[in-house]
Image: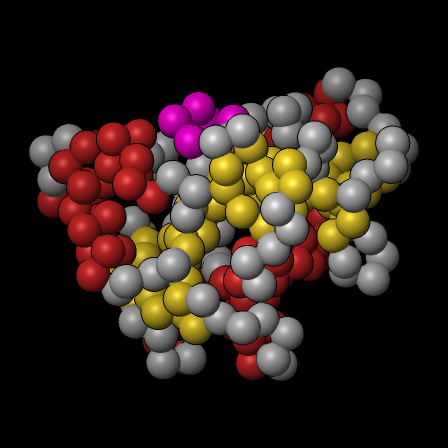
Amino acid sequence: MRIVVLASGRGSNLEALIDAQREARLPITLVGVFSDKADARALDIARADGIAAVHVDPRAFGSRREFDEALFAAIAAAKPDLVVLAGFMRILDPAAFKPWLGRIINIHPSLLPKYPGLHTHRRALEAGDRLHGASVHFVTAELDGGPVLGQVRIEIRPDDTPQSLAERLLPQEHRLLVACVALLAGNRLRWAANGVHLDGAPLDRPLQLDEDGELVVDAR
């Protein structure tokens, strides 16, 4: 599977994909990393691994739609099978990515549908939640609202802060993203008109990541 990654920052999820590819845990080829930030560490990671690294500057365009159209034109030139948003901190114009529906996913640090948008760790703590986590979902016009493929859960500790919660969740995000991409690359997990299908059958709830790094059907 040919994959393009979009990232705005440190690129830790990109590193997780590269490591899994290198260790033959993922049958993928990373064909490009795109960022809206010229100084994004994700671009440096890509260059160091010989992956095409492309900065598309939003300031060079008159509108968000013009930027998004140029971004997806550049992405299309790389001929990916899947686009992965991994810490890409821009809201995309739905018209620009409409041709990619079912081929574009995002990883989000909450147990969707809880806490779409920003500051998810703080919001989970303020709500008094017992569990927190991350979700991988198909991207649609609704912000963080597309069908969820898989999730990982962690317990919230009494002494957690937004920072400590984020730090404990991040390694689990990496495991979740790799597991979801593995199922997509294996053609086991797919987009359908009525939601997400696993091995040809519709899922009525997101898969859950177990301790062995496998995505399993949630019995609850």
Residue at far top of view:
127
Q: Residue at x 64, y 29 (%)?
A: 112
Relative horizontal placement of residue 64, taking residue 15 as reference (left or right): left
Q: How is the image coloured?
A: secondary structure
Q: Is residue 133 magenta?
A: no
Q: Of 216 and 96, which appears nearest the observer? A: 216
Q: Residue 57: in sight, yes or no?
A: no
Q: Can you say whether 127 is above or below 28 in the image?
A: above
Q: Residue 190: in sight, yes or no?
A: yes
User: Which quarter of the figure is the N terminus placed in?
Assistant: bottom left
Q: Is residue 142 magenta?
A: yes
Relative horizontal placement of residue 86, taking residue 217 as reference (left or right): left
Total marks shown come to 0
Q: Can you say whether 209 is above or below 33 in the image?
A: above
Q: Can you say whether 122 is above or below 165 in the image?
A: above
Q: Position of residue 43 (x, y in %)?
A: 36, 65
Q: Position of residue 53 (x, y in %)?
A: 30, 67
Q: Position of residue 37 (x, y in %)?
A: 31, 52
Q: Can you say whether 7 is above or below 109 in the image?
A: below
- Magenta part, dominant SS: loop
Q: Residue at x 82, y 33 (%)?
A: 131
Relative horizontal placement of residue 139, taking residue 94 as reference (left or right): right
Residue at far front of view:
200
Q: Residue at x 66, y 58 (%)?
A: 179
Q: Of 170 and 204, which appears nearest the observer? A: 204
Q: Which residues are magenta?
A: 140-145
Q: Residue at x 40, y 79 (%)?
A: 48
Q: Position of residue 36 (x, y in %)?
A: 29, 49
User: Which quarter of the figure is the C terminus placed in?
Assistant: top right
